[in-house]
Amino acid sequence: MMKNSADAAYSQPSDKVAFWYDPRKRSILYQLGILAMVGMLGYYLVSNIQTNLERQAIATGFGFLEKEAAFEIGESLISYSAADKYARALLVGVLNTLLVSFIGIILTVILGTFIGIARLSTNWLVSRLAAVYIEVFQDIPILLQLFFWYALFYEILPSPRQALTPLTGVFLCNRGLVFAVPEFHPAHAYMAFAFLAGCVSIFFLRRWARKRQAKTGMVFPVFRVSVGVLVLLPLLAWLAGGAPTTMSVPELKGFNFQGGLNISPEFSALLLGLVLYTAAFVAEAVRAGIQSVSKGQREAAMSIGLRPNQVLQLVILPQALRVIIPPLTSQMLSLTKNSSLAVAIGYPDFVSVAGTAINQTGQAIEGVAMIMLVYLFFSLTTSAFMNWYNKKITLVER
């Protein structure tokens, strides 16, 4: 009798349980302990840095951004001179990095998609060439590729006086690619606005075409209409602005060309290396995404009379994008971060400009912190856009 009552008393839970036996309270205690250790480590590092900086009489802070930079930058999207401040010099570096990254991402997606589709071609030669491209450019480090293309521009191409002229008004030499461009005219601004208006109209046109196809099953020729809109609207704006035809034609004066648009060897080598290297990985992602769609989907689409290009556009790619987008996002981030290797071939990207500022001012901590923040911003922005696009194209199950 007493044994049973003792067992019952033992089996009843107590209202008061020590906190070290409560998993929730114990986890909070562990987190507070780790947070305290991280805080103490951060305090030690910061105080140690401040002590060493004071010992070496190195000023801290971002006040140097308002000082004169006193160094030139070879390429700039905005006006810049050595008399400008460090803040403007760093802005030039940011814009240069944005330029090569933006153009590189667009070209990489186009080339990678083409190579990935070619890798699955039934034509043996096309498939083998795509496979060789992927293997070669994936296995060579990106830095070596940049050195190769940079040396190719400077060692193989002739001087400006013996420049190659593949087309009239186009010159290719060791100073880069120089070609004629239209001189600035107010009509060009109208054309840009017309192009943006065309892009907006195409967005709404695509939405309308999808709804129409879902209701009636009729396919609207969105691609052909979109091309027509993007060509017709800027053309009308050009005609309304007076149809200016004056061109800025490059001319050889002294040791270099004057006029036209000059794409430097550094920019060309960097862009070419980044695109060719990253496109090999994008091609594999595209191939894997297309192969993830079952063969029955293709056969069902062909059985209802869809043409091969319609099968790829309407059936295969919408489903393959679910597999393609995540690795594609990673490759976009990789291309943006690999652009920091531009310092090895002399292209003035943000890392190169910030490195020069660090060498002149000694503000290494501030300079490296700005580099980290800029690339963090680029990465987060790209990831946010791709995540939004990934959610937008997600197929909703019914």
Image (cartoon, helix red, strand yellow):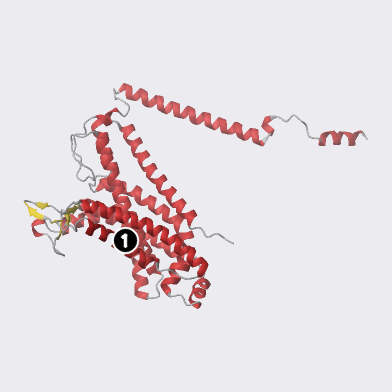
The picture quadrant where one finds residue 50 is top left
Q: In x, y percent, where is residue 238? A: 23, 58
Name the outermost residue toward the left: 254
- Whether residue 390 can be seen here: yes
The foreground one among 393 and 241 is 241
Q: Residue 169 appears in which quarter of the rendering?
A: bottom left
- Asked whether, in this view, residue 301 is left or right of residue 337, the answer is right
Residue at left offset 9%, top offset 55%? 251
Residue 28 location (% of width, % of height): 60, 33
Q: On the picture, is 51 further left or further right than 151?
A: right
Q: Tag count in the figure?
A: 1
Q: Tag 1: residue type? A: Leu
The residue lying toward the viewer, choosing from 102 and 196, is: 196
Quarter in which the C terminus is drawn: bottom right
Q: Position of residue 132 (x, y in %)?
A: 34, 67
Can you say whether 243 is above or below 67 in the image? below
Q: At numbered mark 1, what does the secondary structure look like: helix, strand or loop?
A: helix
Residue, x 82% and y 34% (percent of image)?
10
